[in-house]
Image (cartoon, rainbow, N blue to C red):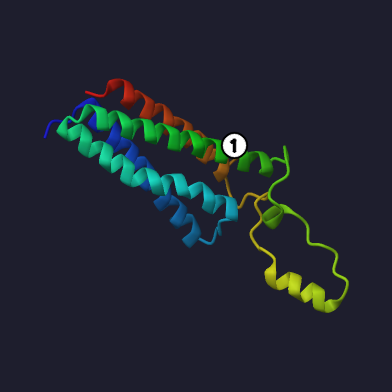
Amino acid sequence: MRLNPPLLIALSILAAAALSIAGAFVFEALGFAPCELCLTERIPYYAAIPLAGVAALFAARGHKKLLGAAFAGLALTFAASAVLGVYHAGIEWGFWPGPKDCSGVLERARSVEDFLVQLQSAKVVRCDAPALRIFGISLASWNAVVSVGLAVLAGAGLRAKL
């Protein structure tokens, strides 16, 4: 099998997406629990992994039209992922409010019983407090950076398709 540029691009996207998800699981195993937005930001990667595999298959077999559709799908998937990353990073930096269920304050309890109910339903992991920063940048910000890079790479694959 000859490794043509579109095939290399598809395999690179596949590897980057798989390694990103693996990295998220490693951070979880190390005790950095994800918030609801972090879990949402994984969805594009879950979709991109099989799509990149299909793109690699199309590239290896020379299916230009199907390959173009796969790369377009990957570019859109990672563009959406970048938007999610920017949205989450903006919440972390206090640029805008986040969803009430993971960054809002608890309502004032009228009784001890109400307070206990709130404690049982309250999310422990907050979306507006990054669990980890690497080189001063939160994981949500890194997701935006990686997603933009992968969207650009998918666009390059679309232009280079066989």
Image side of residue 80 versus residue 123, left or right: left
The answer to whether residue 74 is above or below residue 97 is: above
Image side of residue 10 versus residue 135, left or right: left
Q: Residue furthest top?
A: 159
Q: Is residue 134 visible?
A: no
Image quarter for residue 151?
top left
Front-lying residue, 113 or 141: 113
Q: Amino acid at mark 1?
A: Val
Q: Residue furthest right?
A: 110
Q: Is residue 151 visible?
A: yes
Image quarter for residue 13?
top left
The answer to whether residue 45 is above or below residue 9 is: below
Tag 1's secondary structure? helix
Q: Residue at x 31, y 36 (%)?
A: 12
- Determine crowd level at label 1: few under 14, some 14-19, many 20+ residues with C-alpha closer than 10 A: some
Q: Residue at x 69, y 73 (%)?
A: 120
Residue 119 pos. (x, y %):
73, 71
Q: Residue at x 47, y 49 (%)?
A: 42
Residue tagged 1: 86
